[in-house]
Image (cartoon, rainbow, N blue to C red):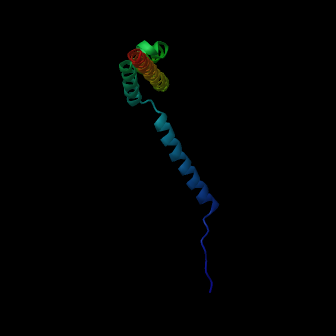
Amino acid sequence: MNTCIAKPSSTGLRGLKLAALAIGSSFILAGCAGNPPSEQYAVTQSAVNSAVSAGGTEFAAVEMKSAQDKLKQAEIAMHDKKYDEAKRLAEQAEWDARVAERKAQAAKAEQALKDSQKGVQELRQEGMNKVQ
């Protein structure tokens, strides 16, 4: 029995690899092409609004200012069609806003704890006064 197994030629494989590389590169370049980071901008705007609602301007003023400044810079970069810079700034602004929100939440929780402890202390004192 004489069987012949076809072996792909090295030139055929080489051509296939080059074609795959060219297609992959075009997808990468298409992904990097200048598309405005509208979705990231919307996410960042939402994060900033959430931080403001949580009390970020009061409890985390530095982080809030940083987030708002970077968001404005991102808006300017988008207007100037510097989309990579706009996306980077919007991402940084989002994280600054998230930090501000968490700091505000932590500060409020700490204040609530202090208020609770004060209430417990007052009840204890009131109980001690009634015993005497």
Q: Nearer the viewer, residue 104 or 32?
A: 104
Relative height, residue 22 to residue 42 (above, below): below
Residue at image position (46%, 33%) is 33
Residue at image position (38%, 30%) is 39
Relative height, residue 93 to residue 25 (above, below): above
Q: Nearer the viewer, residue 101 or 16?
A: 101
* Residue 28 % position (x, y): 51, 40
* Residue 22 % position (x, y): 53, 46
Residue 68 sits in which quadrant? top left
- Is residue 1 visible in the rendered image? The answer is yes
Residue positioned most to the bottom? 1
Residue 132 sits in which quadrant? top left
Q: Nearer the viewer, residue 58 or 42?
A: 58
- Is residue 74 visible in the rendered image? The answer is no
Q: Nearer the viewer, residue 9 or 40?
A: 40
* Residue 51 % position (x, y): 40, 21
Residue at image position (63%, 84%) is 2
